[in-house]
Every structure is written in C-alpha cells, then in structure tokens.
Image: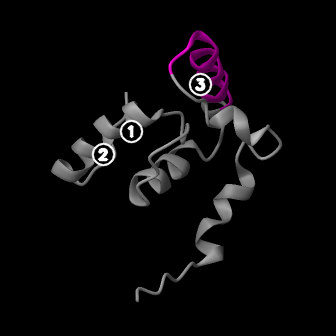
C-alpha cells in the first residue's frame, strides 16, 4: 500500500488562483466540439490573467493531471510541455 502525504500549505497558491470563483466545469471541457473549444478558450483567458498561472502549470505537470485546463494549458499542450520537462528538467511554455 502506498501512502500519499499531502502538504496543504504547499498548495496555498490554489487559493490565489483567478479560477477560485469560476465554475470548475469551465476548466474541464469534454470532447473537441466547437462548444468544448470555446469553453477551453474561456478557461485559458482566465488563466492568462492569473497571478499563480506558473505554479498551477507546474502542479499539473508534477502531479500528472491528464484532464482539464491547468495553468493555461490543455491536456494536449501539457503533454508537449511534460515531454520537454522530462528532457530538460525545466518548465518551458510558449
């Protein structure tokens, strides 16, 4: 059995996110329809105004979040970022 230890103080940045008062469903679009793409764009717009965008993206990469918009990046965008992160050890975004 693996014990997972969460350090709540380590993730305090989450309380500072621009998404705190947004509908969480906005950040988890389903599929690739025009509606889902619009939803992802709206979520990313909120992320782009966020003071903790990089912390959020780092968290998503570090914890292997495989769905949703985190730190302004979709699942597919994070796959690319994660590959570079594994190669270089640096979080490189465009």
**Residue placed at 66% from the left, 38% from the top?**
50
Q: Secondary structure at mark 2?
A: helix
Vertically, is 42 above or below 14? above
Q: How dense is the environment of label 3, judged by Cα within 10 Å: few (below 14), some, or many (20 and up)?
A: many
According to the picture, the residue beneath numbered tag 2 turns out to be 82
Q: Tell me: 13 left or right of 56.
A: right
Spatial separation of the CA atoms under disc 3 and disc 2 = 19 Å
Nearer to us in this view, 18 or 40: 40
**Residue placed at 41% from the left, 85% from the top?**
2
Vertically, is 18 above or below 35? below
Q: Secondary structure at mark 1?
A: helix
Please report the bounds of the magenta region as a residue range: 32-46
**Residue 26 screen position, x and y as percent:** 70, 32
According to the picture, the residue beneath numbered tag 1 turns out to be 78
Q: Earlier in the sequence, mark 3 or mark 1?
A: 3
**Residue 32 screen position, x and y as percent:** 50, 19
Taking the view exactly as shown, the residue that stands out farthest to the left is 87
Vertically, is 7 above or below 62? below
**Residue placed at 65% from the left, 75% from the top?**
9
Q: Is residue 34 magenta?
A: yes
Whether residues under marks 2 and 1 lie with C-beta atoms below 8 angstroms apart, the answer is: yes
Q: Earlier in the sequence, mark 3 or mark 2?
A: 3
Taking the view exactly as shown, the residue that stands out farthest to the top is 34
Q: Which numbered disc covers residue 40? A: 3
Q: Secondary structure at mark 3?
A: helix
């Amino acid at each position: 059995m693996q014990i997972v230890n969460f350090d709540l103080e380590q993730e305090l940045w989450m309380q500072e996110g621009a998404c705190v008062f947004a509908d969480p469903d906005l950040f988890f679009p389903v599929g690739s329809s025009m509606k889902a793409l619009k939803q992802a764009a709206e979520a990313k717009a909120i992320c782009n105004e966020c003071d903790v965008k990089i912390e959020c993206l780092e968290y998503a990469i570090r914890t292997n979040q495989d769905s949703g918009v985190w730190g302004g990046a979709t699942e597919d965008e994070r796959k690319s970022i994660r590959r570079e992160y594994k190669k270089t050890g640096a979080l490189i975004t465009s």
